Image (cartoon, grey):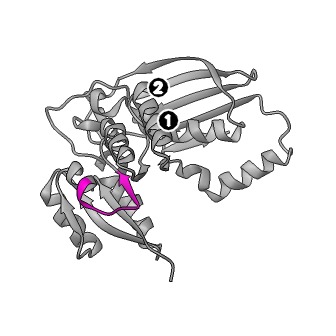
Amino acid sequence: MEKKLKVGLIGLGGICRIAHMPGYKDFDNVEIVAICDILPEKIESFKEQFSIENVAEFTDYKELLDSCDLDFIDICTPNYLHSIIAVEALNKGINVFCEKPDAVSVEEALKMKEAAEKSGKKLMVMRNNRYRADARYLKKFIEDGKMGEIYCGRCGWQRRRGIPGKGGWFTTKEQSGGGPLIDLGVHMIDLAIWLMGNPTPVSVSGCTYAKFADNDVSDSVNSSFGDKKSEGTFDVEDLAMGFIKFDNGACLQIEFSWASNIEKETYIST
């Protein structure tokens, strides 16, 4: 019988419930042995939602890392904690899988890379779009030379009135690192650059805007993500547009928004 991989989940919010945990339920070789969230009520609701029993429970991720025999942890916390938890786990010899973005700064991302290299353990940050059937087909199509030279690209993700967790960590730059550029942009930018053959960026220019911070109109399911705070912080952009140049002469146009005057949500990577 194949050995089951023992995983500890850290952060039991929306993304863990909507994407990560349903994925684990589809695999027979993964066992959830520990769960952690700073809010005890989230632990209880998570156990009830997924019918989980006989699992170690923690409200402090440090205790989870110190107390459990794990093959890897899965980090689904607010963005600013990604690098902090990942580095601690890697230093303790635990493999790490982490939600995107990698971190809220280049410096923090490099700390994760260095910890992984020093420990010899695996570090993987969410790159789920690379595994879509259409993306894998297109990657092979390109590698087979059927696209010729790829010298320009365009990617974007525009939502109609879909600001997540308004006033909470999603819209607080210190905790999120940014608005839709961080929340949505990392997905499509990564996919586009991967399809283009991973050229190295040499320059980036762009503009950001926050025009809907005071608008409470919402007709998108995405606005239900995160924990809203009526008197909370909104110091991130709701629209980001930019242009990336690469070392091979190629370029990439980008556009990401949480709230746009469009008929329906759309995303592209071409």
Residue 5 at what x, y percent from top left? 43, 68
Q: Which mark is residue 185?
A: 1
Q: Give the magenta-colored segment's residue range.
A: 66-75
> Which residue appears at 68% of the width and 39% of the height?
270
Q: Do the residues labelled 2 and 1 touch (CB within 8 Å)?
A: yes
Horizontally, is 184 left or right of 41 in the view? right
Residue 77 on the magenta segment: no
- The amino acid sitting under disc 1 is Gly
Number of numbered discs overlaid on the protein picture: 2
Kindly state the secondary structure of the residue where label 2 is placed.
strand
Residue 99 at what x, y percent from top left? 41, 47
Residue 12 at what x, y percent from top left? 27, 56
Q: Along the polypeptide, which appears first: circle 2 or circle 1?
A: 1
Horizontally, is 29 left or right of 169 in the view? right
Residue labelled with disc 2: 240
- The amino acid sitting under disc 2 is Ala
Quarter residue 104 falls in: top left
> Which residue appears at 37% of the width and 25% of the height?
237
